[in-house]
Every structure is written in C-alpha cells, then in structure tokens.
Image: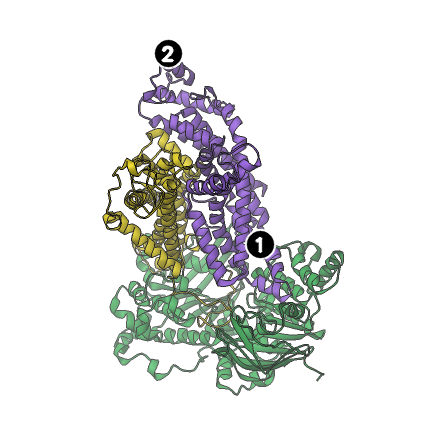
Chain colours: A green, B yellow, C purple
Amino acid sequence: MNDAPLVRVENLRVGFGAPGGPAVVDGVSFELHAGRTVALVGESGSGKSVTARSLVGLVGAGSWVAAGALDVGGASVLGPADRGGRTRGPSAAAWRRIRGRQIGLVLQDALVSLDPLRPIEREIGDALRLNTPLSAAARRTRVLELLEAVGMPEPAERMRQRSGELSGGLRQRALIASAIAADPPVLIADEPTTALDSTVQARILELLESITARGTALLFISHDLAVVSRLADEVLVMRGGRVVESGPTEAVLGDPQHEYTRALVRAVPTGVARGIRLSAPRPAAAMPPPASASNQDSRETAPESAHDDPSRQRVVLDVRGVSKRFARRMAVDDVSLQVPRGGTLGVVGQSGSGKTTLARIILGLTPPDAGSVLLEGGAWVPAPERVRRPRRPRLGAVYQDALSSFDPRLTVGQILADAAGDRSRVTELLDDVGLAGQVADARPLDLSGGQRQRVSIARALAPRPGLIICDEPVSALDVTIQAQVLDLFDELQERHGLSYLFISHDLGVIQHMSDTIAVMHDGRVVEQGSAAEVFSNPQSPYTQSLLAAAPRLGRSA
Amino acid sequence: MTLLEPEVESDAGRPADGRRGHAGSGHGSARGRVLGVAQWVALGVIGVLLVAAVLPGLLAPGDPLAIDPAQAFLSPRWGHPFGTDESGRDIYTRVVHGAAPSLVIGVAATGIGIALALVLGLAAALGGRVVDFGVSRFLEVLFAFPGLLLALLVITVYGPGVVTSTIAVGLATAPGYARIIRSQARAVAGAPYVEAAVVLGRSRARILGRHILPNALLPVFVLVTLGIGQAIVWAAALSYLGLGAEPPTAEWGAMLFAGKNYLATAWWMTFFPGLAIVVAAAATTVLGRALQKRGAR
Amino acid sequence: MAGRVGVRVLGGVFVLWAAATLTFFGLRLIPGDPAQAILGGPGSQASAEALAAVRAEYGLDQSIWVQYVQYLGRLITGDLGSSYSLRMPVAEVIGAQIGGTLLLAALSLAVAWAIALGLATWSTRGGRVAGAVASGLEIVAAAVPHFWLATVLVLVFSTTLRWLPAVSTPGPAGLVLPVVTLALPLAGFLGQVMRESVLDALASPFVVSARARGETESGVRWRHVLRHGALPGIALSGWAFGWLISGAVVVETIFARPGLGRTLLNAVQLRDVPLVIGVVLVVALGYVLMTVLTDAASRLADPRLAQPGATGRRVADPVLTPSGGSR
C-alpha cells in the first residue's frame, strides 16, 4: 500500500464524566490511508460516532479522551486533559487548523446539519473563508465548482437556497461539498445516507466513492452492513464501545468469526427466504410458560374453523380503486390490493410514495376520495365510523413510532388491558410477544425501542384480529432488534393464523416478509405480484431501478 | 415553554434508538433531579406565604390596622423591621397580613381566567371546525386589547374595586390561556395514541375521557402555577393605580398605592410590599417551570 | 408571500371591526343612562341640557342599530368623538399623546432585545453556573412589577444619587428611567425564550458541522446561533408591543410622562367613555399592524416558515403573561 497513515488511532478510550471512569469507547485502534475507506459498523450506542468525533475534538462537553496514539497528519492531537475536560490536547486554535483543513465531517441529515437559516453558498463558503486565503469573489467561484463537483444540478441557483428548500439528496450533496471544500485529506462520514431513500442513497454512495478515488481517506460510519460492504476496504465491528472484530471487509462480513458479527450478518433480511429465522431462537426461559398454552390452543384452532366457515373469504382485505388527493398531489392514485388470508402482502415504496396514506385509508382514519375497502368481505371504507366500530377488533395496527402511539400516562399493563378489555390477559399478551410479566408495570418511555415495538404488537393482538396493518414497524430499530421483531411477526402469524399488510421502504425486509408484493411510486401501484416474481423478474422500470439501487451484502458493482 | 406547544416533529430518518442513555450526544439527561436549589427555595417561600395567608398571627402577632400616630414614618429598625407608615402601622405586620388578600386575589383571578380559557380552548380544540374558527377569531379580537387594556375596559364598565379588578385580571388573562389550552388539546386530539385508540374501536366519548382530557388538562396545572404569580402582579398594578383594593386594606398593591405619596420621605412604605410581590411571583414562576420541565420529560 | 400578507391584512381589518363592535356593545352594559355615563357617570350631576346635547350628538335617541352604523361610519372617517373630560376631539388628544408613547415603547423594545439577546448568548457560553444565574435573573426580572421597579429606580437614581430626574422631563435624561423600567421585565420574558432557542441551536447538528469546518466559538455564535436566538424575539414582538403599551399605563403615570397610557388611565378614572374607546381602538390598530409586520418579519428571517407544510421551530407563547402571545 502506501506510506504513513493520515490518521493513526491506537487504543482509543473516550468517556464522559471523571477521566478514567467508565468509557463509552474502549480500546479502538485503526489507521486511515489515502484513498482507502475504513468503516465503523455497529448499532446505536456502540460508540462509533464518538470514536469519529474524537478525531476532530468534538466529542462534546464533559468528555475525556485517552489513547496510546492519536495522530492526525503525523502530529499527535493528544495532550494532558485539562481539569474541566472541555477541550483537551491541542488548543482550540490548533483544533481549528485540523477541522475542515485536515479532516472534513459529514453528518447524517443535512436538513439539520446545515444551518437552516443560511444559504448553502454561505455554509460552504465558510469552510473556504476559515481554511483558505481565497477572496470573497474567489470563494464564490470555488463554491460553484464544488457544487458542480458533488453533482448539484443548477448550482448557481441552488447555492442561494437553504437546506430546507433542497431535497434530501441535494442537501446531503451540499453538506459533502462543505466538508470537502478546503480539500482535507481525510473525510469522516457519519451515517451520511441514513435519512435517504435507497435510490438517492445509491447516488450519494457513488459520490463518496468518487471522492475516495481522488485519494481522500474516508472514515465511514454506518449501521447498515450492506452499505458498508459496498464502500469499505476495511471494517471495524463495534459493540458497547469495543471493537469485536476487524479486518478487510470481505473477510469480516463474508466469513465473520465473532458471534456478534455473525448475528449482525444473519440479521440482514435481504435475500433471506421467507420463514427462515433472522435472529437466534428465543431462549427457553423466555418461551411462554405452559400456563397460557391452553389459551393459545383455543386461538390456534381459529384459522382452522375459519377455513370451514363458508362465510369467511379467502381474501381478508380487498382494496378497490382507492384514491386520495392532498392539495395538488395525488397521495394515493387508484390503488387496488388484496391481502390473502393467513398471508402477507408487502407494500414497498420510498418516502412520499403514498404507502402511509394508503395505510390510513385502510385503517379508516383518512376517508378516500374514491374507491372502497372490504374487510373480510364486508363493507369497511367508506362507511360511518358507527358501523365500522364493532368490527374494529378484526383489524389491528402496528406503527413505526411505537412510543408516540402509547398514551404517555399509562403503563404497559394499562395499555394492554385497555386494548384487550380484560386485565387478566395482560401477562398472556406479554408472553405472546416474548416479554416478561414485569414489563406490565413499566411505562413505554422506560423501555427500549425493541421492547416498545413488542408492546405495540401485543396491543394489536389484544382484540384477536384477523389482519394487522404494519406501517414501517421495524425501520426505527437496530438491525439485530429488527431481526428479532421480524421473527416475532413470523411466529405470531403461524401461531394465530394472522394476515399482514406489511409496509416498508426496505426492500430486504419486504422480500423476507411477504408472499405477495405491491410496489408503490407516486401514489400508484406500479407492480404487483408474488414476491419471487417481483424480485427475480421485475417488470416495471421503477422496480428495476429500486432493485438496482438497493445495497446488498457482499461487494456488488 | 416546550410543554405548552406541540413539539416540532422531526423528520423520518432519525437514527435507531435502541438503548437509552448512552454515548453520542454528550448531554446527559438531567431527569430525576428536578428539584434544584432554586426550586427548594421557591417551595420554602411558597410555604411561608401559605402560612402567612392562613395563620398570619404566627409570623406577625400584631394588628395590621393598629394605628399609633406617635410611631408614624419610622424607618426600618429593631421592633419595626420594615418601618411604619403614615399612621404608625407596622409595615412588616401589614405585609404578612397582606399575603392572604393578595394570594386570594391572585388565585381567584387565575381561576377565572383558566376556567374561561378551559371552556373556550377545549371547545375550539374539540368542537369541530366551525367552533374552532369562531373561538379563534374571538380570541384574536381579545388579543387586540393587550393585558391591562382589557382589564381597564372592564373597570370602565363596572367601576373600580377589588372584585372588579380581580375579575378584570381574570378576563385579561383568559385569551392567553385559552390559546395555549387550545393548541395543547389539539395536539393531544391529533396524537398518534388517540388514533391508535380509534383503530382499537374505542368510542369517541371514551377516547375523550380516557386519553384526550387527562393529557390535555395535565399542563393546565403548570399554567395555573405560572399564572398565579403574574395575576398577583397585575392585580397589584391595578390597586397601585387606585382601581383595585383600597387602603387601608393590608393588600400589597393597596399598600403601594398608599406609599407612593411618601416615596421621597418613606421609601420603605413601597419597597417592602413590592418586594413581597416580586418574591411571590418569582417563587411561583420557578415552581411552575420545574413542573413544566417534569411534565415535558 | 403576498397572498399570505393579504390574508393577514384582511384578518386585521376583521379584528379591528370586531374590536370596535365589541367595545360599542360592551359599553352598553354600563348600567344606567349612556348619556349620563358619557358625561362621567352617575356622580357627575350633568345638566338636562348637557344630557340632551349628548343624546343628540351620539344619536342615543335612535335605535341601537342606527347608532351602531353611525358609529362605524364615524370610525372609518377617523372621527372618534370628543372627550368629555378634556373637551377636545378624541382624535386630537390621541394625536398629541401618541408620539411619546410610541417612542417609549420602541426604545424599550430595543433595549429589552439587546439585554435579552446579550444575556442569552453570554449565558450559554459560561457553563452551568452562568446558565442558572441568567435563568434566575430572567425569572426575577419577569416577576418584577413596573410600579415597584420604577419606585426602586427612582429611589436609587433620583432620590439618593440624584443622577436622573424622578419626573420624566423632555429630553433624553427623562427617558432613561421609564425605558429601563419597561425594558427590564420585558427582557426577562424575551430572555427566557431566546435562551431556550440559543440552547436548541447550540445542540443542533449544524453547529457540529460548523465547528467541524473550523469555525471559531465566536463565529458559531455570531454567524449561526444569534439568528436562531433572535427568531422567537421577532415572533414575540407583536405581543411585546401590547405588553409595552399596557406597561406604559403604569410607567407614564409614575413618571408623570405625557402619553397614551396616562391619558387612558385618566379617562378610565373619570369614566370618559369616548376617550377610553378611542385610545383602546388606536392601541388595537397598533397591535394589529404590529402582528402583521411581525408575521412578515418572521417569514423573512426564517424561510422555513414560508414553506408549505414546513415544520420550522414554532415559538411558544410566554405563558407567564396575562396577554398570552403573539401568533
């Protein structure tokens, strides 16, 4: 390879509070070389962002940093920690010579990572003003060049706009332009594509690749193994502040040695056939105790009798030509779908494709302008709420943001008792979703994201529905938690004969969960068919582009 | 302030949350330690005020109206820590005994304001589009008579006096409260957990009683706490202008009114009653904000 | 933007009409003979001729609807009737008094802004202690009644130090104490919201981005944070105007300073109904104008607000105030 590393980190430890106390980053070592990409992979709380920010001295107030070596551009940025631990190592001025000039930083969502009150020209120009001797006029020219370099269309007009006036992809480009403005040899990108749709993400990743191709060293931080596998030469898998495994990307992700890495890799649903578990089987202790088994037995027979009952239809949910217009935009445009009994219909689309509006129409929360929805063969939408209410127990819902779907005053037990209309079923419901009985006394705020989503599923199950509408139920979760929750959905489907309408932006999740798939784009269903057909032989150009943009584990392209 | 307005929603792409309270941001949560030094002091002050209001004799055994012309205009000294007024009445005793009328006026005015605001705010938030439009326009019109002006209008109609001025302050505060209660109730009524209850097939009445009202009314306690201090200030201002309680009532505003003619010679006559107002108002504010932070989580 | 302003102007006209109507019918609630009330209430012992003259002038012998229409007609032409107590047309009285009050309010607003913004920016720099001190100062300032603050200021600066006049004289020296009296409590209110906004901004990722490109601490404050801190201040200016006018009633009285507030108080005390109505309607007009301006200024300063469906930071009403907030 090449000469001296641009950044050398050896046994890095970072913590908050008293120096020497518990560390949130513990013993991380890596080197950054020109033109190479190192990725830090881990779930939330793994310490990957803190590691990255310690390179630019921006860990935050009250933090301390210690390391065997922490060199940027050949010079150490370590020094005696001062009493307050506020700035350590080099003086504030010395840090400023590193920031922007030697290391550029790209954060997650440019909507909030660029000052929303200032035009992007000034945000990018600031990096030049601070780090180059250019005059105001020269800066302006350079900003234009930079915007062109990051693929900003109509840069002369865009540079006068603020981050809020740009689309997600464009403002992320502007943010990258501001980070590379002073031509730093090292770029840190902290979850730079997490807020983006997959097709936009693909283009931003291309941009980052082109930047490393020009010789910039990239420290890439992500929770997404597929993205990392595409971009990184070397990967460090972090958990709880420690590196559990590191090495060349192909080796680590292709043949993971550490148990945690294996769990991470296994948790990725993309390409995993339907019905195969993504997470380790639930330990025996957490299995539902036999006490509640009889209860479940009675329910397990329900689907059987449903088959015998001629009045029950093969199709649980029948959406017929539903449309909804908001202001100028058709949010949902003549959509027809069917959910088979006991099966899963996956609805996939990017943000703004109308999938959430569709879910709200089906749930009877938003009246459609046209079309109708039949639930178990009976009229459902449009209908007066009075007519719909007695049949509501047949239809459950699980939302993306579980926390906000719970009344903040109520405990888990109260929430579930409310939903079941029966206090005695709370423990049984918690068992059903793999939660311990004590959770009943907790408030949702005090639970982890995965636990909250389990409670949310338990609530949906409480009235014994036949169909559950799941609107992005796992997109706020870490990948291993996501895997557990997806497995739970599968278990429950089998146990209770449930049907799902499963909405997600994530092709991998949809592929893994669905029997049939509907692809939505601009309010329309552009393609519909069995999961296997749609993924192996997509017909519509939009589906094809979506599939092409989806990052996959294992180096593509 | 965050509690009283719907929180700004953030965009979809938040990082996964997983575990709580771990690295990343650097600002640790200060939850749990809601009562700091300032809050304890405020609680203590309010405790003393309540004692003064209920059992003034415990803190100041004298008679607030006892005249002793020989002792007139004494500056603060041993035996008269706050001095005496033009008739030789002990200012300290009067300030202590003034707690009851001042607090009663403050509480009553806030009560009137909040009660009106609850009716208007909840009607606007929950009564459908037409009611909301009507109430909102009505509130806008009331806002055009800012603060004291609405109170002064009321006093013009009904004449000065302690009852009128209390009602006037209550009316003047109502539009502000109503607007806050409306937006809070609207936020709650549109909250995802209310929709979740609809999806579960709950009736409108049940959703209202179980979810909307409790959550919309909780912050009203904060409003009341924050409001009482300010109501005391505004009622005292009316008294000071000679439109509210009248001397020789031992009410703080009225004492200020009585003292303003002797400002150059007997500053203590206005200083100490005024100080009582400031301390009372600041203490309720500190407490109200602590409640607010606790509620906002 | 133009459409939005148009809507606001229409709304303002509606508010003014409704305010005038409310005042008109509200004052019919005064018990007894309105002519008697106009002449200063039951205690004024007005002569029969005077009563008849007033009835004729105000058309009180006609039906209430005719009176109402005539009243609106006069308002549109700027005729606010004449003051009984001052024996002058109300419009003339207001014309003579309004300048002083507006000057007082504008200066106070500017001073309050400077103090609040300065405090907000400084206190968020110096760590926990500075924050607590600033928060305490703001709360106490906001709790201080004008009449007491004025008293203390006069005691210190006029009676004891003899630096400034206790009675507002024409000229700059006479303005100092009234302006400080009005500005300090307002700064307390504004400071609370601004500091919160500054803290929010400092915790935002864009500040990390700015620091990561090498921005200095003062650069972060001047170029980024200050504007965010000022936003709620702009949004609250309409509310602050109403609050200042309301405070001017007290302050002008204490400092014996001629102005709208003092005129209003005298009119209320004398139950000079035409003058009360006149002043109140003029203040309402000012308030409406201020809110329209504030709205436009907020939109200019924060382009997020101008976007359809934008979720820019919304400013909460200062809860601590009787008059609520600005939106």
Give yes or no for contact between labels 2 and 1 (Cβ–Cβ under 8 Å). no
Do the dots labelled 2 and 1 sit on one chain? yes
| Residue A457 image offset from top left, x and y in percent | 37, 69
| Residue C75 image offset from top left, x and y in percent | 48, 25
| Residue B67 image offset from top left, x and y in percent | 26, 37
For residue A181, above or below residue B198: below
Residue B115, image quadrant: top left
Residue A200, image quadrant: bottom right
Q: How far apart are marks 2 and 1 (CA)?
A: 64 Å
Which of the two residues, C172 or A530, is positioned nearer the viewer here? C172
Q: Residues within 10 Å of mark 2 (few under 14, many from 20)?
A: few
For residue C55, above or below residue A16: above
Q: How crowded is mark 1: few (under 14 residues within 10 Å), some or many (20 or more)?
A: many
Which of the two residues, C291 or A328, is positioned nearer the viewer here? C291
Which disc number belongs to residue C49? Answer: 2
Protein chain holding label 2: C
Q: Can residue A369 be seen in this view?
A: no
Q: Is residue A83 visible?
A: yes
Q: What residue occupies the far front of the structure in this picture?
A: B70
For residue C92, above or below residue A182: above
| Pointer 2 or 1: first along the chain | 2
Protein chain holding label 1: C
- Kind of element beneath mark 2: helix
Name the residue tied to disc 1.
Answer: C226
